Image: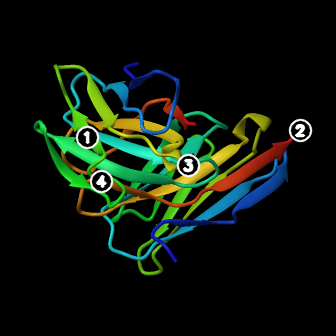
Amino acid sequence: SQQGEEDPQALSIQEGENATMNCSYKTSINNLQWYRQNSGRGLVHLILIRSNEREKHSGRLRVTLDTSKKSSSLLITASRAADTASYFCATVNYGQNFVFGPGTRLSVLP
Amino acid sequence: EPEVTQTPSHQVTQMGQEVILRCVPISNHLYFYWYRQILGQKVEFLVSFYNNEISEKSEIFDDQFSVERPDGSNFTLKIRSTKLEDSAMYFCASMSGQGWGTQYFGPGTRLTVL
């Protein structure tokens, strides 16, 4: 499998529910970042978690990082229809370029 | 809030033609990137640029591709002879400095090669 793979590939939930997306990676990282992409649009940075951090919060977002398992999760609490988008994790190693996973398509139904 | 801008938003070209995609990074940023995303697939790294030279490039970034920072504000990606498989969204990104921080992405240019 490739660096930065998210699962599930697609997730459909009702408004108000929580959404959890996972990301696994293979190599050592400096940090891991989550981005959101609305259909046909650019990437919007959500949150960055460094390799020495285990959890981080930003509003309704909670990100965890387990470097021993080489995995991260993104939790969106109390989801809204406007959260409907694709979510990508990007791993940043000690080089410059980001490696993106294939993304999770989240649909929040009103 | 400063943002990365890209022009055009959509470019249609014939196979074999040259295209130039333009980006204006955030003004005080030092690192610049191009990525592409084929429809429905993941975002793929193409090239990074720092101090007026390429610092890293992927296998995708072959001799048909080139990047340039012709002045203090623009950052361009040129595809010399487009192929059908070059059809994709192309994203420019910039980052302020070292420390492996956040890359800020532009809205993308959709390139369609006919």
Disc ID at residue B62: 4
- Please identify, in this view, whether the residue under mark 1 or under mark 3 is nearer the observer: 1
Of tags 1 and 2, which is closer to the observer? 1
| The disc label shown at residue B66, or none | 1
Rendering coords of residue A38 (x, y %): 64, 37
Question: Is the C terminus of chain B in the top left, top right, bottom left or bottom right quadrant?
Answer: top right
Give the CA distance from mark 1 to mark 2.
Answer: 45 Å
In space, the residues marked 3 and 2 are separated at their CA atoms by 30 Å
Q: Please tell me whether mark 4 sits on a helix, a strand or a loop.
A: loop
Q: Chain of mark 4?
A: B
Mark number for residue B38?
A: 3
Chain letter of disc 2 in the image: A
| Mark-to-mark CA distance, 1 and 3 | 19 Å
Camera-near label (3 vs 2) is 3
Is residue A72 rendered to the left or right of residue A109? left
**Left or right, A49 with reference to B101:** right
Kindly indicate whether the residues beneath marks 1 and 2 are on one polypeptide chain: no
Identify residue type, mark 1: Ser
The quadrant where residue B3 appears: top left
**Mark toward the start of the polypeptide (4 vs 3):** 3
Q: Are marks 1 and 4 on the same chain?
A: yes
Determine whether, in the image, residue B73 is placed left or right of residue B78: left
